[in-house]
Image (tube, helix red, strand yellow):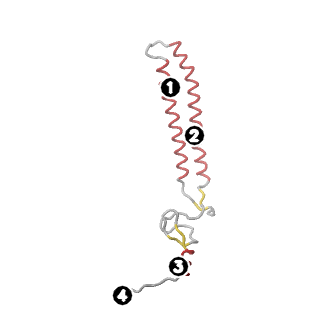
Amino acid sequence: MLASRSISRETAHARLVAEKSCTFCCDVIPKEAKKCRSCGEWVVGTSHGFLAALLRLFGFFWALVSVAIAGGLWLAAQSIRSWVWMHSVNPMITPRAVDFVLYVVIAVILLKGIAVGVGFGIMARLSPRRPRWWT
């Protein structure tokens, strides 16, 4: 016959108070723990650091510069279109063909610039976390 051990309500309550759950792996860890023993994640307030903030800011400015370049290219496209309309030697090169090529280039610049900017933001989010009290 197996011996069973009964736990009083006070002991069970004391055990619940002394332990908490890891927010990443849901393992039970001591309440005063700063790092989870199972998954290795910090369970205290963490800071992503100065470099992560710079990386996020760089991503924002990258996307902003891409939008500015696309806007400048769109303004230049208006004058290129009128020049092609006036000086087109080849009848196959029409302003609509020039518009199509320029707008495709503008769309590629916008999509790549915004994708790279978002990528920098994601990389900043994935940077290693350190506790705020760690110096």
Q: Which residue is mark 2?
A: 62
Q: Which residue is mark 4?
A: 1
3D distance between C-alphas at marks 1 and 2: 21 Å
Q: Which residue is mark 1?
A: 102
Q: Quick one: label 3 or label 2, which is nearer the N terminus? A: 3
Nearer to us of marks 2 and 4 is 4
3D distance between C-alphas at marks 3 and 2: 55 Å
Residue type beneath disc 3: Ala
x, y (%) of residue 33? 56, 70
Query: 10 Å neighbourhood of mark 4: few (<14), some, or many (≥20)?
Result: few
3D distance between C-alphas at marks 2 and 4: 71 Å
Q: Quick one: label 2 or label 4, which is nearer the N terminus? A: 4
Q: Secondary structure at mark 3?
A: helix
Judge whether 53 appears above or below 21 on screen.
above
Query: Residue at 58% across / 25% down in the picture?
Result: 75
Nearer to us of marks 1 and 2 is 1
Query: Residue at 47% across / 17% down in the picture?
Result: 94
3D distance between C-alphas at marks 4 and 3: 25 Å
- Find out whether the residues at labels 1 and 3 contact each other: C-beta distance under 8 Å: no
